[in-house]
Amino acid sequence: MKLVIAGKVRVNPARRDEAVEVALRMARATRSEPGCIQYGFSADLEDPSVFCIFEEWQDEEALSRHFASAHMKEFQQALPGLVGGAPEIKRYTVASDAPL
């Protein structure tokens, strides 16, 4: 079963450019991980201080390796001061998918 992680987080508008750099570094490093199908950040069109995240993982093992990675630790250390509130992120277990 594939795993999907999706949600949003508000970033500090005064540090948005720095948050973009941190998010891009994280996304680039994560996309090269075994088991990562898709990983990315985007900005909300109505509120550019809200970043949306969407991830697809091959399985639980891949996601667990991701959470233990050096770039995840680096990312978590960079977050204080960049975010302006608790993230709203959910995890979904997907039994199947198909083009719409």
Image: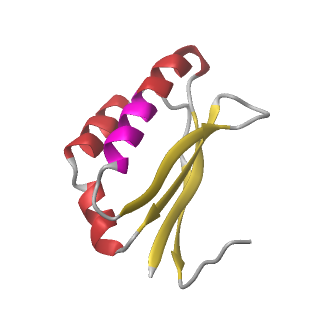
Quadrant position of residue 42: top right
Q: Residue at x 29, y 33 (%)?
A: 77
Its colouring scheme is secondary structure
Question: Does residue 48 appear to the left or right of 3 in the view shown?
Answer: right
Q: Residue at x 65, y 28 (%)?
A: 49
View extreme (right): residue: 46
Residue 32 spot, x, y in % from top left: 31, 49
Q: Residue at x 57, y 83 (%)?
A: 96
Residue 90 spot, x, y in % from top left: 55, 62
Q: Is residue 25 above or below residue 37?
A: above
Quadrant (top left/top right/bottom left/bottom right) for the N terminus: bottom left
View extreme (bottom): residue: 95
Residue 24 counted in the magenta span: yes
Residue closest to the eye, 87 or 5: 5
Residue 22 spot, x, y in % from top left: 40, 29
> Magenta part of the protein: which range?
22-31
Quadrant (top left/top right/bottom left/bottom right) for the C terminus: bottom right
Asked if residue 86 shows in the view, the reply is no
Question: Does residue 100 appear to the left or right of 83 in the view shown?
Answer: right
Q: Is residue 77 above or below residue 36?
A: above
Question: Does residue 76 appear to the left or right of 84 in the view shown?
Answer: left
Q: Is residue 65 above or below residue 24?
A: below
Residue 83 spot, x, y in % from top left: 50, 32
Asked if residue 13 shows in the view, the reply is yes
View extreme (top): residue: 14
Residue closest to the eye, 46 or 97: 97
Badge count: 0
Residue 66 counted in the magenta span: no
Of helix, strand and loop, which mostly describes the magenta segment?
Answer: helix
Question: Does residue 58 appear to the left or right of 70 in the view shown?
Answer: right
